[in-house]
Amino acid sequence: MPESLDSSQRELGNRVDGLAREHLVALEAGPLQGRELATEVRAASKAAGVFGLTQPVEIGGSAGNATALAVAREALGRHNVGHLPGMFGPGQGLLGDLDEPLRSQFLVPYLAGEISGGFGMTEPDGALRHTWATTDGKELVVNGQKSYVTGGADADFINTLVEVDGTGPAMVLIETGLPGVELIRRFDTLDGAHHAAFTFTDVRVAADHVIGAPGKGMGVAMRQVTDVRMAIAANSAGLCAFVSEYLAEYLDRPYRGGGKLGDSERTRVTYGDILISSYGARSVLYRTARLIDSGENAVNEAMAAKVIATETLSDIVDNAIQIVGGQALSIDHPLAGIYQRVRSVRLAEGPTDVLRMNVARGRLDLGKGRV
């Protein structure tokens, strides 16, 4: 663990490490899938006091800060179990800005796991206009389409970025059962997640379903996006360590010509680069978490952390498969599973090239950040 962690953060890291070793590794390798697997993972996580890290204190959670969440997610990644469902309770996310009666109607059952939500920002390629809404009395009339609603396949509601005429972008909570809301496609991604595409045709939504101040929708959305980027970065940094350790054990095996597999100078150069790159990704992760916890606007840094961690992991696992050879191409091999998942997360919450461009804009046009 980083030397900058305090005693409570170190204790958390040790506790999550124990949870992974004693329970989650076996579950990951076992026969359970879907809801059955999520139920077992959830029970083990709750027993270890990890489940509530993403939830507010007022509902019994522990409201972990950015560093605590980085510690927990990196520890899970180090055992290649961070992708398991049911590990953390749903956080407030955008719903934390809801007032009554919507708070009781949506936030409380959402945190309890009784309803599920999706997150819709992405428009279809070639869309002539962003999803939009007009005001009609105390209602918004929404039209448009979202081509990639994160978690939308099973969602009861979607936090949707909508261009509201006269006020600008807003995050609007749209229930999927409303007339005019149509799920047009379900799809699974390489990381095992379930998403969907929706159309909205004259969907009438109460005006008080706007989350946060009208016209501030992009800022509201970006708060959640930054949290997810940090989650991806932390798990990826942990997976870098997992791959490094896996290779260390592999290279310690006897070679048929005598000596060990790791005696090759060329292999050692590659492995040294893997260790150095992994160290860099981990350092950026914790630096960014500390900036967030200090209250700084760390949008640029979170983008950088996500890019560095995912691109580093992609390179590391590709080199590891090259070293291990054909056996690592088996679909049930741990390196093959990581290779498949990292290809997906390199696109999640902003493709790498888009994030690079945004970091440059943050510095050159806005003068933001420490990158």
Image (cartoon, rainbow, N blue to C red):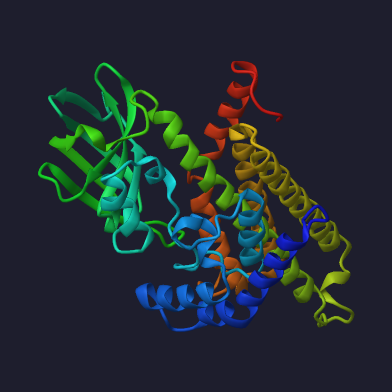
- Residue 267 at x, y = what percent? 82, 62
- Name the residue located 21 percent from the left edge and 47 percent from the top edge: 175
Answer with the quarter of the image where residue 113 lies: bottom left
- Name the residue located 43 percent from the left edge and 50 percent from the top edge: 92
- Residue 31 at x, y = what percent? 44, 84
306 versus 91 height, above or below:
above
295 versus 119 height, above or below:
above
- Residue 165 at x, y = what percent? 24, 19
Tell me: 36 left or right of 104: right
Answer with the quarter of the image where residue 160 lies: top left
Quadrant where the N terminus sits is bottom right
Is 227 or 238 nearer to us in this picture? 227
Q: Is residue 55 visible?
A: no
Tell me: 269 left or right of 306: right
How many labels were placed on the picture?
Answer: 0
- Residue 106 at x, y = what percent? 29, 51
Q: Is residue 95 visible?
A: yes
Quadrant where the C terminus sits is top right
- Name the residue located 88 percent from the left edge and 82 percent from the top edge: 258
Is 230 or 355 nearer to us in this picture? 230
Is 178 or 281 nearer to us in this picture? 178
